[in-house]
Amino acid sequence: MNVLSQTSAAEHSLEEGARGAKAPHVHLKGVTRIYPAVANNPEVHALASTDLDLPQGSFFSLIGPSGCGKSTLLDIVAGLASPTEGTVMFEGKRIEGRPPEGVGVVFQEDSSFPWLTVWNNVAFGLRRKRIDKAEMAKRVDAILAFTGLSDFAQAYPAQLSGGMRQRVCIARTLVLQPRLILLDEPFGALDQQTRLLMGDELLRIWRETGATIMMITHSLDEAAMLADHVGVMSARPGKFIEIIETGWPRDRTSEIVSEARFGSITAHMWSLLREESQKAMKAR
Amino acid sequence: MMKHRAIDYVLLVVGLLVVWQICHELVGEYALTSPLATFAYAAKELGDAHFWNNAGASALALLYALIIAMVGGLAIGLALGLNRLAGDVADPMLITLFSVPKVTLYPVILLVFGLGLSAKVAFGALHGIFPVAIFTLNGIRKINPIYVKASRSLNLSRSRTIFTVLLPAALPEIVSGLRVGFAATILGTLIGEMFAATEGLGFMLIKAIDENNVELLMSLTLFLFLVAATANGILLAIDHRLHRRSAAAA
């Protein structure tokens, strides 16, 4: 299945780049972001000096009080924003102010294009590349089948539910075969049941594509269920208080929410976050 | 559904004809010809080469004016919409200019362009360019910022972002602008012909008034009404379709 073919390609490039040494897929060193003072607003220290290494094929969740700089961090890794200080490396190359090839982003807000059909939304990112029509159709159809959207190929996003539209956005990113997928609260606008199902879907995508995933979420459950590692961030200026290892098997599903350890992980997260969230609330 | 629509339209047309006939009865033959007499005269005019020469002259002026208004309005709206500061500064100015009665500028236009085609075109374009620019500007500004962020994350170039994201996203607003601009351009072109021209339907209208040819006056009005209403109807249908399609995503 050509949907999955990227795994080997990614491994190749990593081997070539790292020569056996286990270089992290994503490497952040001293990444800081300060928003300068504008008019009457003082400068905002959004992100304190942050270090982070994500191994190839890992699933990392970011959790923290509102306004702690999670999105800022993700935007920097995505190349959508530049760090004030520090460096971000992806596959051994420095990311700077420009989204690198091989990185896909899914946002919380529905970013599907309402003027395009589902099929054309998914094909959108491919049109820029010089790919012949038959190859493009093959890739789009494969991703639509993979994400369960085949029956809606000719529908417009306005005809779909919120969950399905978010699926369109994920498919639009997946079709480009990203080796790093960044998700900024992708299921934040969905109801709890849909969230759990989409979480299962995401785990399947993660396993079958072999991509590295970094995901922001507001939901402690979602973070504990999906990630290998959960980075818990402090109130602004954001920094990691602790990085929790969940230790789930790779072929997990949402059913792990019934395990005792799931409860203790979320409880531990909350004990770390409670005070920070209060600080963040007072700061508003 | 479609059947209801059709019945509504038939009722509207019949209603208008009845009102027309009643007005005719009230004010008399010398001010307002009856629908029947008007249709008969209009049919005769449609077979006349003189009419078609003038209609052609008007159509040509309208075409030029439309091209200038639409292309110019789109370019102005797009440039201002993409540059936030320029947009903020220009927006109130555009609206003020839009609301200035352009007839006051007509003497200046005549002095600059002289009698003839270019003055008509300039006057028509002057009417149409503002609504197109204002609607385009607002259309671009109202675009959900998430589309811009998404196109950045897909690493699109600036021109690709404009043509494949910004313009399609603003298209419903732009089409509304084109519709309003179209109506304004017809108005401007005809007024231009009425005041200073040697040919065109506007010129025929003013001559019919001079000669007190009520039948011709009414026929021309009827013809212009039908052309404008048809064009507006088509653009309105496109407009509704585009707005409906993007409605749920807003």
Image (cartoon, rainbow, N blue to C red):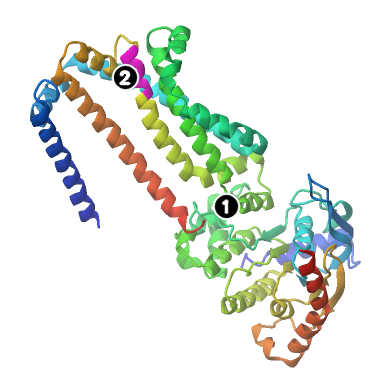
Q: CA distance from mark 1 to mark 2?
A: 43 Å
| Whether residue A218 is visible | yes
Quadrant hosting residue B223: top left
Chain that bears disc 2 = B
Tell me where the magenta segment starts and ends, as one range.
B188-195
Element type at mark 2: helix
Point out the frontmost of discs 1 and 2: 2
In the rendering, at what x and y percent does residue B76 appear? 56, 30
Find out whether residue A56 is within the magenta segment.
no
Residue plotted at (43% across, 50% down)? B243
| Whether residue B72 is visible | no
Quadrant hosting residue B229: top left
Q: Which residue is mark 2?
A: B58
**Magenta-highlighted stretch: main secondary structure?**
helix
Count the marks: how many? 2
Q: Which residue is mark 1?
A: A124
Vertical placement of residue A193 versus B250, above or below: below
The three-letter amino acid code for the residue at tag 1 is: Phe
Residue plotted at (48% across, 43% down)? B173
Vertical placement of residue B172 versus B205, above or below: below
Residue plotted at (8% across, 31% down)? B25
